[in-house]
Image (cartoon, rainbow, N blue to C red):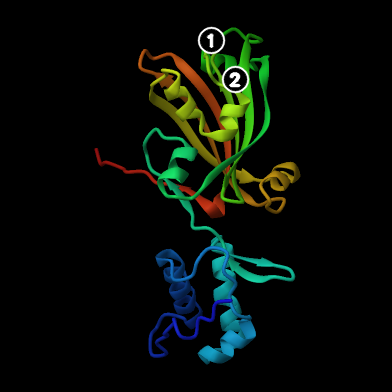
Amino acid sequence: MTSLDQLISIDRASSVPLYSQLARSIEELIASGGIAPGERLENEVRLADRLGVSRPTMRQAIQHLVDKGLLVRKRGVGTQVVHSRTRRQDELSSLYDDLADSRRDPRTRVLSFGRVPAPEVVAAALRVEPGSEVTAVERIRLAGEQPLALLRNYLAPGLRGITGEGLAATGLYRLLRENGVRLRVAEQTVGARSATAGEARLLDDRRGAPLLTMTRVAYDQAGRPIEYGDHLYRAGLYSFELTLIAR
């Protein structure tokens, strides 16, 4: 259990509200590794007393970080630090590679794998006739033991070497590279919505929790569509980073 009274200083003469100073200090400790993912914080009442602030102020600071997805309250456990947010930059990469590069222990739970008739939106994206047979896969991507994303992918006909066992062990893009497919460019749309009950259950979140949505069509060096993806990410644990250039 982590006590923060020795790690946090507050400026009572500052115009910045005390709860905001507390929240910012805790957030900086999480970002720097001063408080590790999974660690429990000391009871809010005792922590407020140690820091010399009111209990409502301490509670407001903690709730601010819960709302940002940095802390989570668990019945019978207390307040814990969650894993840091995964950030995807504006480049063509896979979530598996992003997690591996940041040493976040990527894991995969394959929910389904097989050949299905292509729905119209998938057929249009992959440039095949509606109802043509394509490979469909649904997976949960985890960082360690923590569910992060629900991934649904459809693959163009004729791809070899892609198996459910392979996808359970590594990322889709790694398998494609190992089988000679080089992705060159992708068209991607990002949005947001609330989690359904089923999605929340799979992602270990609450019904109605905010989700980032992403649809993507990835093309190889010859300009052929290889993959159509329809993905959901837990908004408190994931973000997209873009570089914008003025015209």
Label 1 environment density (alpha carbons within 10 Å; few <14, some 14–19, many ≥20) = few
Q: Residue at x 39, y 14 (%)?
A: 223
Report x, y in % for residue 133.
64, 11
The label on residue 158 is 1
Q: Are marks 2 and 1 in contact (CB under 8 Å)?
A: no
Position above or below: 186 against 66 = above
x, y (%) of residue 43?
A: 63, 81
Q: Position of residue 35 (x, y in %)?
A: 48, 70
Q: Which residue is found at the position 43% from the left and 27% from the top?
A: 187
In the rendered image, the quadrant that contains the N terminus is bottom right
Q: Is disc 2 surrounded by few (<14), some (14 to 19) or many (20+) residues within 10 Å?
A: few
> Between 133 and 190, which is closer to the camera in this rendering?
133
Kindly identify the amino acid type of the residue bearing the numbered disc 2: Val
Circle 1 — which element? loop
Work out whether residue 218 can be spotted. Answer: no
Q: Which mark is residue 172?
A: none
Residue 237 percent location from the top left of the image: 53, 53
90 displayed left or right of 68: left
Seen in the picture, residue 247 relative to 124 is either above or below; the reply is: below
- Residue to which mark 2 is pinned: 121
> On the picture, is 69 further left or further right than 100?
right
